[in-house]
Amino acid sequence: MRHWLLAIVLAISLTGCGMRHWSKADLALASLGVAANGVDMAQTWVIKDDANGFYELNPGLREVSRDQAMGIMVLVNGGVLVAADLLPKWRTGILGAYFGGKVVLDVHNYGIGVRF
């Protein structure tokens, strides 16, 4: 899992997503979104490895391997942060929706018994 978190940091760095002109609220939302994505990635890892009835609901991750799913999640996370950086007028909304969506997924997964 540690190498995937490093990949997220690398993806953000390589895209030039500077976050220099972001408000403190936007930085907090981005940080919370990345943390919630980390939880979602760990839960997806468990779902992909566990044959105890867990089923991936995300159609984009359903038919791929665990490693491919992790790669997709890293790219999506980086894409959201880049979009937020490139669209300052929509930044707070993008980051808020991203964080909120990830929390909903994390709570749902926890509710059905996905633990790590």
Image (spheres, rainbow, N blue to C red):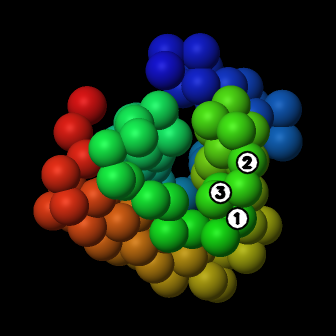
Q: Amino acid at mark 2?
A: Val
Residue sitting farthest toward the top: 3
The residue that disc 1 covers is 60
| Residue drawn at point x = 41 percent, y = 40 percent | 51
User: Residue furthest toward the right?
Assistant: 15
> Viewer-proximal residue, 2 or 26?
2
Question: Where residue 79 sits: x, y (%)?
Answer: 74, 57
- As drawn, the label of residue 48 is none
Left or right side of 76 for 27: left
Question: Which SS class for mark 2?
Answer: loop
Residue 31 visible? The answer is no
For the C terminus, the quadrant is top left
Residue at numbered disc 3: 61
Q: Nearer the viewer, residue 19 or 46?
A: 46
The image quarter in which residue 70 lies: top right
User: Can the viewer see residue 68 in this picture?
Assistant: yes
User: In the structure shown, which secondary structural element does the residue marked by tag 3 occupy?
Assistant: helix
Establish if 43 lies above or below 11: below
Q: Rate crowding at label 1 as few (under 14), some (14 to 19) or many (20 or more) other CA atoms within 10 Å.
A: few
- What whole-number distance in Å separates the C-alpha atoms at marks 3 and 1? 4 Å
Residue, disc 2: 64
Query: Label 3 sits on what residue type?
Result: Leu
Q: Count every numbered label the image shows and give the total.
A: 3
Q: Are marks 3 and 1 in contact (CB under 8 Å)?
A: yes
Pointer 2 with pointer 3, Cβ within 8 A: yes
Pointer 2 with pointer 1, Cβ within 8 A: yes
